[in-house]
Amino acid sequence: MRRRWIAPSAIVWLLVAAAFFLIPLIATLLFSLRSIQTGKCCSGAAYSLIVHDHQFWTTVRLSFLLSLETIAISLLLLVPTVYWVHLKLPRLRPVLALMALVPFVVPPIVLVVGLLNLYKGAPSWFYDKPYGFLAAAYVILAFPYMYFALDAGFRSIDLHTLTEASQSLGANWRTTLTRVILPNIRVAALGGSFLTLAIVMGEFTIASLSAFKTFPPYIQVINEGQPYEAAALSLLSFLIVWAAMLALLFVGRGRSRPAQVAAAR
Amino acid sequence: MAYLELRELRRAFGPVVALDGIQVELETGEFLSLLGPSGCGKTTALRLVAGFDRPDSGSIVVDGKDLTRVSPSRRDMGMVFQAYSLFPNMTAEQNVEFGLRIRKNRRAARRKRVSELLELVGLGHAGKRYPHQLSGGMQQRVALARALAIEPRVLLLDEPLSALDAKVRVQLREEIRRIQTQLGITTLYVTHDQEEALSISDHVAVMSSGRVEQLGTPAEMYSAPATPFVAEFIGTMNRLEAVVVDGERGEVEHGSTRLTVDAAQGRTRGERVLVLVRPELLELEASTDGGAAGENTLRGEVLTQTFLGPVTRLKVIAPDAELIADMSTARAAALPIGSRVVAHVPVAGTRLLSLSEEPASDGQDRGGR
């Protein structure tokens, strides 16, 4: 058997890409390890201060729960919608795609002002609470990421045949969606969820302007007067998002095998 | 009363009429194939029976119950699709078990039934495999087992073999027939492959332009096509346009050649007809230059030879028609391309269709039985 080899140019590009991503992280790490008093290496004081700050844990928890809520609402809204549009109303696909582009076009600052006005008369449990107002705003913000991920997932399976096969065996719509369709678009749903998680964990503008103390505004406050702690926080936030994504991947992976793309109709 | 009845089913998609009032009946345990070219409406008819689409008018009755407005999940119709339709996230066993789980059957009963069905389709060893680990033929066998698991009132097969290679297709169609006969399940089969339909069906309904052209046994279809379309579609047929010149003696005139065929007896003089002769009934022999052609013969020249194994198909250009004749490969060797030949049209065994009347005027029914 011929031995596989990697082209030297590919190795060079890999090294360049790795340097591009790793050098800032290493620099941040080295900076965060400097002593707060002397400014010299190496001390874990910045990390110690951060992890002992209850604001850190409160804001991380809030942002993480918000991202889970956003993912749940987005999936509940979009999976049946995209399924139905693919199955019965394919002409609406371009309309949905256009709507999904709106959050890209409208800047977050315009979006938050508009939403604050729109929801002004809403009950306080919604308007004054992050799990109400912010979650609603984040669902809008995550719409394009979740929609395009799900759209690609639905396009990769033979939706009509799988649906009809399930129905002919006696399954109703709900059973068909949950036991036949969802497991086969799981990868797409996970992809959309990852993106949503990353967006919500890092969203600053809406949270800040609507005066909710989530993780990104907390980073910003630390960044203003504590440079070593800010560097430590940056690295920690990076690790937290990756850990959250791995957790999501682990939870969503399930036991079954990867879906096979069915034959085209 | 028939077990499955399609009563005057009509379905149009905008200006396109997919089904134009078809009438089909099946007895319990019968195997009926809907046969026709692409776009003839056969799959539309099957989808209406399955409940995936609603007819504009007409009804579907199974065992005396009108199921026209019943949702597909409540019809108890097992269906095997043209595209591979196994659920990719489930093993072969789980696929077969799916319908039984929906019906909340007990676990032990489910397991037993799944095992029996996988054995029945010859895949007892592959129950733990996922669809992507199975060949196309194996996937369709599992799909068949899955459809049979729910003990359907009617088994619907929508060109289940069309994605398979020729050898597997023949093997699997024989298995489908064996299983259908063994279980005695009423089956509606859709195909565009006439060989497939003729080889496994009790009855065949040939469809064209949303209508059933003829419904009968495979033998009837082959030997007594009721319309020019059926004659053309089922097997290969020589078509000679002719005019009846003597109804008493059964004589017709094809171009300048007078032919005697039994089927022309009793026909009206001047009637325009189509003389239909199967290729295997057309006798060819080398023509001697200047010699008389003899009675019931057409002169021509061999245009092509196609080797089909035990027989060779010869295409002959005659003055007023193009003829096709099947003869043993050994005899065909004596009639090379370009040689002059004489084709003998048999007096008996030749069909005649009227060209001046409606297609179904040849004493055959159209659709319902």
Image: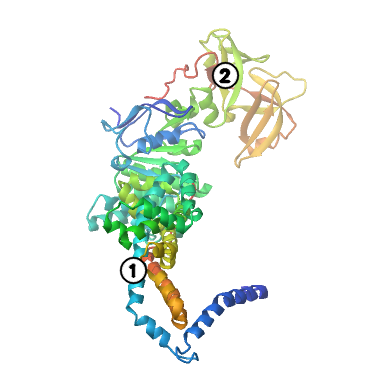
Q: Is residue B278 toward the left or the right of residue A205 in the image?
A: right
Q: Is residue B71 left or right of residue B169?
A: left
Residue at 70% x, 19% y: name it: B293
The residue wearing badge 1 is A62
Label 1 crowd (10 A; few <14 / some 14-19 / many >=20)? some
Looking at this view, is B176 or B367 the one in front?
B367
Of residues A157 and B353, the one drawn nearer to the viewer in this rendering: A157
In the rendered image, residue B17, in percent from the top left (x then y), is placed at 46, 27
Residue A180 appears in the rendering: yes
Mark 1, secondary structure of its residue:
helix
Residue located farthest toward the left when viewing the structure as drawn: B106
Residue under circle 2?
B274
Residue A79 lies, with reference to residue A15, above or below; the image says above
Residue B248, quarter of the rendered image:
top right
Q: Residue A123: image x %, image y %? A: 27, 54
Q: Chain of mark 2?
A: B
Report the amino acid beneath label 1: Leu
Which element is circle 2 on? strand
Does residue A5 show up? no
Q: Residue drawn at (30%, 51%), measured in percent from left and top?
A: A121
